Amino acid sequence: MSNPAETKPLPIKVITISVVLIWLFLAAFPFLWTMWGSFKVEGDFFSRANWFNAITGPVTERQHGSPFTLAGYEGAWIEQEFWKAVINTAIVTVFVVIISLTLGTLGGYALARSGFKYTFWLLMAALVFRAMPHVTLVSGYLLPFFQLNIWGYLPTTIIVLVAINQPFTLWMLHSFFLSIPKDLDEAAMVDGCTRFQAFRLAIIPVMWPGVITTGLFSFLLAYNDFTVTSMLLSQENQTMIPQINAFLGSTQEEGKVMYAVAAVVSAIIPLFVLILFFQRQIVSGLTAGAVKG
Amino acid sequence: MARLRLKNVNKRWGSFVGVDNFDLDIADQEFLVLLGPSGCGKSTTMRMIAGLEDVTEGEILFDDTVVNDMDPKDRDISMVFQSYGLYPNLSVYENIRFPLRVRKIPKEKHDEMVMEAVRMTELEDYIHRRPAELSGGQRQRVALGRAIVRRPNIFLMDEPLSNLDAKLRVSTRAQIKNLQSKLKITTVYVTHDQIEAMTLADRVVVMNAGKIQQVGTPTDIYDNPANVFVASFIGSPAMNLVQGTLENGVFEAEGIRVEGLPLAVSGNVTLGFRAEDAEIVEGPAQISSPVYSIELLGEASMITWRLAGSLVSIKTHKEYRADIGAVVNAAVPASICHLFDTASGERIAHG
Amino acid sequence: MPHKTFLSFIWPSLVAMLLFIALPIVSVGFQSLYVEHEQVLVVGETCGPFGCTEEVSVDAAAMAALRAEQPAGQFNGLGTYTNASHLATDEIAEIFATSENFSEIRNRIMNLPFYKALIFTLSYTFIVTPLVIILGFIIAVAVNAVPAMLKGPVIFFSLIPMLVTPLVGSLVLFWMIDSRGIIGAALQSIFGDPSLSLKASPTLTWITLFVYGVWHSAPFAFVVFYAGLQTVPRDTMESAMVDGANRWERIRFVTIPYLMPLATFIALMQLMDNFRVFEPIIGFSAAASATSLSYLIYNDLRAAESPLFGSAAATSMLTIIGVIILLLPVLRQNWREFNRKT
């Protein structure tokens, strides 16, 4: 791979390495800082005296006898019952992912295999729907949902998130199915399958890479959602992100802000793990749309 | 065993015509090749026979049954696809067994039928492998095995050799020919390679732009091309074609003059002849022009002129040498010439 | 695939989108034509030891009956669209009639809530999007040139600001720029001004939000460009080297043209996402200095006593129109391509 034309002069090497290191710092530092700080008390994390206190934690040591404390987590998870929000988030994400993918694979497969013009219009409509700010849709839901008395429940929110997620899921799976040769399901049909059997026997066994990638993004949408969950769920059914926002209202008193910090870190950790295991799929998912239009 | 009839079959997408009025009878046990450049409608025709594409107009009959509205699975056909369409998650054995499984053929018969197909396609050593672990030629044979395992009424093959390298193509071609004659199953075979068509077919259908250009045996099509398109598509090298004028039985164009052609025709015509029919001569002859290039093919040499804007080539013995630019003469007697109407491209007469 | 089969595969997805995307848009359009009922007032007498006093109160029962009968409120036509908190047609006319110079017009328009939000939304969209593309490209080119062992960790950490939800991401930064947080304190000591606060001035708040937007989205551009860089045709690159192009010229004449379609793709995605900017405003508690269209809707729906459905719906409709205008070039281009194909 190395040829004379590609060896770089020193200044360029220095510049590229420093750009990368600066970026690495910008991207990673805020999270590492907040994670570290979440084990401190407010007097250290928001130190009036010296920012260095956030690292060493003298006030924490004075209050809890050790430079690290789980007080923030205790307050958030137990006192403020953050664990309920975690369970709700788990329920919402699991169902949103499963339902989105079920509907999306069927629809995406049909869009990829039908040659008629209306597929173009459906995909364009999906693109426009994808661009709608979610809060505009929410303003359309509230009144009917109040009337029908289905506001505030988890299933309602799950279905809404599935629907909002559909345009994206359809696009993604549509372009993924286009990359599976048509020959495969046609061979199955000639061999004696109906269209649905061909989908089940020939396509389902080979579609998992695309489905996993799409599933990751469905997961992120449901997990990260604030707009829909904060407006459509009643207080007791609240998920993590709106719950964090709710903490902010009650954090004026000394110490409470650390509950929010602990909750934020709790919400970030699963994403760390997710990226750790699925980095390749996420990158390929982000670029799939770009490569295939 | 079945006879296959296509009655004025049309395929249109909006205003785009894919197949235009395709009308043909295919006899039982016949090996029919659909030949044409890409986009000529040959694959679409086959896919309509398979039921993978709707027929816009016309009828397709298997024996005496109209199958237009039948699903592919009910047509009792099997098909070999260009990219094989093997199930990547199944072993070779299971790939070949798949049609038996989904068609609910009694389980106890499966092993015997699959092993028979495995023997015929010489895949005995690979039955437990996955498609990803096979070479292109082996995958092709799995697709073939899957097609024959069930002894369908009709075999359809869509460019089955186009993904193989040249050497493998020759041997697999022979294997397909051999299998078909053993199994005696009506076969429709799509290709853009005229050598495949000539070597395999009982009859060839040459298509272009959705229309049938000519139907006939390979010899027929080679010796009597129906129009300029067929003449330029069949043969290697293809037929030489020169545009010029014909008057009183004399064809004239820049660098070429042929006498003794039929008197009945006159006007703008295209003269065609095959490279192997003409020969280089000393002294005055029909072609007399500076050489454009000389290529050594191994078994022969090929001399090329540029006459009236078209390249014209003649094969001669392998020791022949000439300088590019030197004037060389060649004999093109009227008896080896074909005449086509320049405007319509249709054949007018034989020289 | 025949129409019937197509439909049998796609109907669940289609029904979901029709019910929960298309229908709500219709519902929004409908709601925007109505306003909340006026309060039904009753005059009652409360009598005490010092005589009776008349008291005006809201007749809860009558209000409930009215709401049950006409849940959307009373018909208002396009009134909501033109009132002071939306297009403010009268106010605009007055401003132009009575203002003396441009900066006065600007200041007075910035006091109208809808225009204030629109201007912030557009500024955010059209400032953040190009910066994201440029920064993403620079990072991608730099990462592409560093040793392979660095690439994995860089991509790992780059994905975090993008995948963490905006509310959480902005909170993390918000705590750091607090005057007691590390960045806030650092800025104070750099500028030697102990009262400096990024939250205090509107301009600084806007800049903070823009910086957050770039930080949040640059990884997306980076990842897409980086993937694109892996596929830059080697032949073209090598022929440029043979032709004598230097490093910069190779980027200028080979890499950038090759990545142009990706830049268009990123721009499209970013325009859509940035136009709905909303969560950072909550995360940074920036509503006093910067509001966006989405935030206005959220705020109306969150109104303390009863949600202002009509007002939220009118803003929603205007936002939807904005989205469609934004997408128009894309749709037109797709339409042309589609026509060329058929």
Image (cartoon, rainbow, N blue to C red):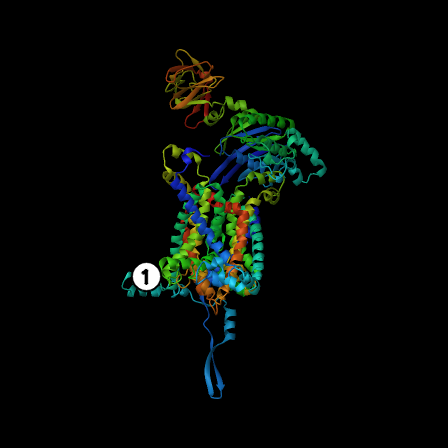
Looking at the image, which residue sits at the far top? B283
Q: x, y percentage for residue C57?
A: 47, 78
Q: Chain of mark 1?
A: C
Which residue extends farthest left? C100
For label 1, the SS is helix
Q: Quadrant of the C terminus of chain B?
A: top left
Left/right of residue A150 with respect to residue B150 in the rendered view: left
Residue A10 sits in which quadrant?
Answer: top left
Q: Residue at x 58, y 56 (%)?
A: A90
Q: Quadrant of the N terminus of chain B?
A: top right
Residue C323 makes an appearance in the image? no
Q: Position of residue A236 (x, y in %)?
A: 56, 64
Relative image position of residue B251 (x, y in whole percent): 40, 19
The residue lying toward the viewer, choosing from B120 and B93, is B93
Q: Nearer the viewer, residue B199 or A235?
A: A235
Q: Is residue C270 above or below residue B37?
A: below
Q: Based on the displayed image, in which of its 4 quarters is residue A197 positioned? A: top right
Query: Is B89 placed left or right of A29 in the picture?
Result: right
The percent coordinates of residue B57 (x first, y second) are 53, 39
Q: Establish if B330 lies above or below A85.
A: above
Vertically, is A285 above or below A154? above
Label 1, residues with CA under 10 Å away: few <14, some 14-19, many ≥20: few
Q: Which amino acid, mark 1?
A: Arg
Q: Is residue B11 above or below residue A237?
A: above
Q: Residue furthest right?
A: B108
Residue occupied by mark 1: C106
Q: Quadrant of residue A196?
A: top right
**Residue in the foreground of this view, choosing between B96 and C63:** B96
